[in-house]
Amino acid sequence: MKYAKIYKDALLDDIIPFWEQHSIDSQHSGFFTCLNRKGDVFDTDKFTWLQGRQAWMFSVLYNEVEPKEAWLDIAKSGINFLVDHAMDKDGNFYFSTTREGEPLVQPYNIFSDCFAAMAFAQYAKATGEDTYSELARATYHNILKKQHNPKGKYEKSTGNRALKGFSLPMILSNLVLELEHILDHDEIEKTLDQCISEVTKDFLDRSTGLIRENVQLDGSPSDTFEGRLINPGHGIEAMWFLMDIGVRRNDKSLMKLAANTIITTLEYSWDKQYGGIFYFMDSEGRPPLQLEWDQKLWWVHLETLVALTKAMEHIEDERLQHWYTKVHHYSWDHFPDPKYGEWYGYLNRQGEPLLELKGGKWKGCFHVPRAMYQCWKTFERIENKQ
């Protein structure tokens, strides 16, 4: 089977046309992300991280697939909205705004900043305009300043149980490579070293082979709901970031560690009754705190396909092929909507659509097209070698 063609055709003939047709706000700039099954807008609020993600995606398409002016125009619409409406006076990014750009939710979430930085960096590459390189750099350095207290004054915990979360080192390991063309070499390597150390020494539990979502500040486990939390999709997505770093550094041991962690996580989190990957789990097998723990989510399965594909390119291990085939069939059998296009985001445990929306507060033009692009290009290299 020629997998590269499956992913390329899905990206260019289904996924991207859906967002081009339904998500562009031609009146106020930026993007609608709350789209029902058919692509009709059901809410006009704008979520900053999704604005950044879509602007980034269309910049990538322009830079890496084909320099179509229409794609650059779409990216520009998102970039304009970020610059004109999404930042406060200190360069922090609001979580959400009205359609017109009036701020609604304060900058409590550092991930809005991360995806704005990614968008500025890719758009700078597309246009050659230093203004956006500077914005990307400034946003990145602002993220680093906040990394030990990401929520700042919006932090709601008392500090009596101080934990650090996996999300930030995970995203930094990808963000720094996205900004490679605008950051100093030494700064990139220093950040990568820090991320690898935290991910592999603090968050990877060597006794189970699983990634913990939260650990104590010294990296030791916390026997609490938060400390036992396993988010399989997060752990697996981080492993393809590590795989990219391993390839960049020709570090075979890091690549093998990433591949083994992907396999271990899948063995732990695969639903043996109905198929698919659970959304949340407890590392000790206790009841998870999250009521949605048994849902099957689009991004979890897509990031797993990317991770397995990248691992198969560099690591000889028949377990990777076994798991790829399993996850591929589950994902392509359950998530795509053959009638109206794009992918469902939320399935129940049995694999039926729980919500028929194509976008909302959390799902936008990002995980589906990014995964299609990554798998297309990786399989192209694999198939060319064969």
Image (cartoon, grey):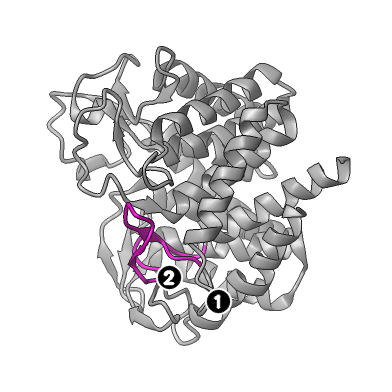
- Outermost residue, bottom side: 27
**In-front residue for pair 349/295:** 349
Prevailing secondary structure class for the magenta stretch in the rendered image? loop
> Amino acid under label 2?
Lys
User: Which residue is found at the position 68% from the left and 63% from the top?
Assistant: 61
**In-front residue for pair 319/376:** 319
Is residue 286 depicted above or below 197 in this figure? Answer: below
Residue 350 magenta: yes
The residue beneath circle 1 is: 18
Please tell me in which quadrant of the rendered image residue 253 appears. Answer: top right
Asked if residue 224 lies left or right of residue 3, the reply is: left
- The quadrant of the picture occupied by the C terminus is top right
User: Which residue is found at the position 36% from the left and 59% from the top?
Assistant: 347
**Element type at mark 2:** loop
> Amino acid under label 1?
Phe
Please tell me in which quadrant of the rendered image residue 67 appears. Answer: bottom right
Asked if residue 241 lies left or right of residue 284, the reply is: right
- Residues packed near mark 1 inside 10 Å, few (<14), some (14 to 19) or many (20 plus): some
User: Which residue is found at the position 45% from the left and 47% from the top?
Assistant: 300
Q: In terms of sequence position, does the residue under pointer 2 or pointer 1 come before the other?
A: 1
- Residue 142 visible, this orientation: yes
Q: Where are the magenta residues, as a range?
A: 343-365
**In-front residue for pair 181/281:** 281
> Which percent across, then down, holds residue 84?
44, 70
Residue 93 magenta: no
- Residue 87 visible, this orientation: no
Residues at circles 2 and 1 in contact by the CB criterion of under 8 Å? yes
- Residues packed near mark 2 inside 10 Å, few (<14), some (14 to 19) or many (20 plus): many
> Which percent across, then down, holds residue 385?
87, 40
Q: Which mark is residue 4?
A: none
Q: Which mark is residue 358?
A: 2
